[in-house]
Image (cartoon, rainbow, N blue to C red):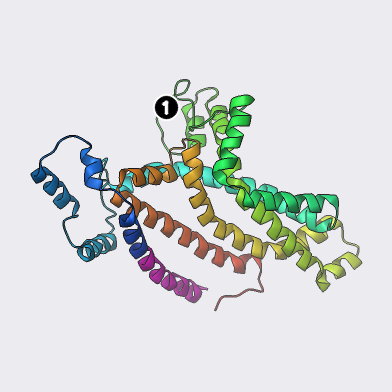
Amino acid sequence: MLLYLFKRLALTVPTFVALMFLTFVAIRLVPGDPVEVRTGERGISPERLAQFRHDLGLDQPVWKQFGDYVWALLHGDFGTSVVTNEKILTEFATLFPATVELSLCAMLFAVLSGVPAGTFAAVKRGSWYDQTLMALSVAGFSMPIFWWGLLLIMQVAVKWGLTPVGGRIDPIKFYFEAKTGFMLIDSVLSGQVGAFKDAVRHLILPTIVLGTVPLAIIARMTRSSMLEVLSEDYVRTARAKGLSPMRVFGLHALRNALIPVITVIGLSVGGLMAGAVLTETIFSWPGVGKWLIEAIGRRDYPALQGGVMLVSAIVIFVNVAVDMLYGIINPRIRHG
């Protein structure tokens, strides 16, 4: 197991190198000048502009800028924001809990809804429920996040008034110091009556929007895997022994069917991070996704480069951790 872990970690090195290069190049293909964004439309002398460019290292050749960028990353320096002059790690650490909270709730919503739905569809194969679930899963997977989010805002938040439009909590009714960065936890620690309920209400729509695509994928994968497992000999033997349907489907079948489902869950982490960019922008959710979108508009090269690398590192780490779980879930799987 340890040898496999080292091999998987070694394979991530070329991935990081490719990400560093692609991120560095792609950002500089975006039209705009970070110096002009920083100085604004005010009149400024050419000498001052040249000084700004020198401070940001933009007066150096591109290959030299990339070399300095890689050297700084190797020393744990992700740079300083062009706009706020804050360290990228500091800004990321401040905003990341909000993205984690939203992503965890979205994945929890997707798993708790998708696995039972897919399992029941496999057990009731060919029924109206199975056909309805497959149609809804295709629609959920194909639905654009920005359209789905705006639709829910217009219908649920604006027309029906059931949930807030955006944000994490009502700043007028509730104000307290963020101790953990996770609003659900901080609202409880604040001791203010109604704070936790308000935080949950703000979380409902973003969770549904961000969790819709992984929900559709998990439901379809669970159904497909369960159908394959239900045709195995050991499942038929368990049925012939007279075991209860709950024991046959829940213990014997579902446990073995979860292996590809867990793979999908691990791979969905990257999709959640990508979907969080749009979801956080639509719902004004102060997380990493919204921060990266704002960094694009401000041509904040260090923020974009550092943010992408940090998010990529987290996604790769989660995928490696998912691989390690295979041997725990199914003892027949062993990593050399």
Establish if 94 lies above or below 156: below
Q: Is residue 85 visible?
A: no
How would you rate the neighbour count of disc 1 (Cα within 10 Å): few for under 14, some for 14-19, many for 20 or more?
few
Is 12 magenta? The answer is yes
Measuring from the top left, give residue 61's x and y in whole percent: 19, 62
Is 232 magenta? The answer is no
Measuring from the top left, give residue 234's x and y in whole percent: 81, 71
Q: What is the three-letter code of the residue carrying label 1? A: Phe
Q: Is residue 230 left or right of residue 201?
A: right
Residue at point 56% right, 56% down?
268
Dividing the picture into quadrants, the one containing residue 121 is bottom right
Q: Is residue 15 left or right of residue 246?
A: left
Residue at point 49% right, 30% down?
187
Q: Quadrant of the C terminus?
A: bottom right
Measuring from the top left, give residue 69's x and y in whole percent: 26, 60
Q: Is residue 150 left or right of residue 310?
A: right
Q: Which residue position is annotated with label 1?
A: 176
From which residue to which does the magenta span run? Answer: 1-19
Residue at point 48% right, 20% down?
173
